[in-house]
Amino acid sequence: MSQAEQRVAELRAQESQAQAQIDASEASWKQARSSLAEAQAQIDASGAAIRSASAQLQASQARVETAGAQVGAAAAAVGGAQAQLAQNRVPLIDATLTVPRDALIIKRLIEVGALVQPGTPAFTLADTAHVKAAFGVPDVRLRGIRLGSPVTVTSDARPGVRLRGQVTAISPSADPKSRVFQVEGTIPNPHRLLDVGLIVSADVAGRSVGQPKVVVPMQAIIGRQDAPSGYAVYVVEGEGGNAAVRLRPVELGQVYGDRIQVTQGLQPGERVVVSGPALLHDRQAVRVEPGTSTSTSTSVGE
C-alpha cells in the first residue's frame, strides 16, 4: 500500500472515530434533554402542589378566622347570659331565707306562694346545739343554787343519757300561783340527744328538782263524809253538756302559798272544781262554761 492510501485509511479511521464521538455526544445530549424535561415536569408538578397547598392554607386560615369570630361571638353571648343570670339572681337571693347556722324549724308562719311584707316573720327556729331546761324550785330548796351551779338532766325518753350544763337564770320572784321560783339551765346538746319540748328531770348541785308534784288551789279541797280525816276533790269529766263531776279521794302534801300538793289521787292536767265544791254531789251533771271556776291541776319541781 502506498503512503497515500495509508494516509487515506488513517483519515477514514479518524473520521469514523469522530463520528462515533459525535453520535455519543448526541445521545448524551438527548439523555440530558430528556432529564431536563423530566426535571421541568417535576418542577411544574411541585409548583402545582405548592399552589394547591397554598390555596388550602389560605382556605384553612379563612376557616380559622371564621371560627375565631364565631368563638368571639359565642363568648360575648355567654358573657351576656352570665350578666343576665347574675341580674336575675338578685331578686332570687332577696327571696331566699338563710340562717347563720344549723337550726330546727319548730313553727312555720307563712305558706308557699304567700305575698309577705319586708320584716314579716316566716319561721320560728331553734338552735338545738344548746338547749335550756326550765324548772320550778320552791323557796326552801333555792338556797345553794347560784348562777353557774352545775345542773344534770335526764329524761325517761332517753334512758341512760345524762347531760351536764349550768344554771344560767334564776327568777328574782316566785310565781304568784305556784309559789315556786323559775330556774333555767343551759345544756350543751351537740349530738341532738335532747329534743325541743322534751320533759326532763334536773339535778342542781345535788338537789333533785325534776320530779313533778301535782298541786291544786286550796278552795278545791273538801272533807270526805266516809272518812272524816280524809280529803277529796271534784274532778270534771266530759265536755259541754255531757260533763259531770266525780268525787275523787286524794292525799295531800306540802303547801305552796294558796295551793297544796296532791300526792295521790290526781294526775296533772285533770280539771277540778274550785268554786263551791261543797254544794255538789258525786256524778252530778254540770256544764262547763268559759270563765267558770275550774282549775287544771299543775305540777311544780321538788
Image (cartoon, rainbow, N blue to C red):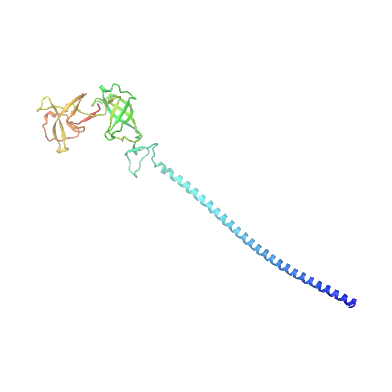
Residue visible at 16% across and 32% down in the picture: 235
Q: Quadrant of the N terminus?
A: bottom right
Horizontal side of 113 relative to 138 (left or right) equals right
Horizontal side of 142 relative to 61 (left or right) equals left
Horizontal side of 144 relative to 68 (left or right) equals left
Name the residue nearer the viewer: 144 or 231: 144
Would residue 63 be seen by someone viewing this image from the given angle?
Answer: yes
Residue visible at 77% across and 70% down in the picture: 24
Name the residue nearer the viewer: 64 or 29: 29
Q: Is residue 36 above or below residue 280?
A: below
Query: Hey, which residue is sitting farthest left in the picture?
Result: 226
Q: Percent position (x, y) of residue 214?
A: 21, 29
Name the residue nearer the viewer: 97 or 58: 58
Label total for image:
0
Which quadrant of the structure image shows residue 170? top left
Q: Is residue 53 above or below residue 281?
A: below
Residue visible at 53% across and 52% down in the picture: 71
Residue visible at 41% across and 44% down in the picture: 92
Which quadrant of the structure image shows residue 155? top left
Q: Percent position (x, y) of residue 20?
A: 79, 72
Query: Hey, which residue is sitting farthest right in the picture?
Result: 3
Q: Percent position (x, y) of residue 277?
A: 14, 29
Q: Quadrant of the C terminus?
A: top left
Would residue 292 be seen by someone viewing this image from the given angle?
Answer: no
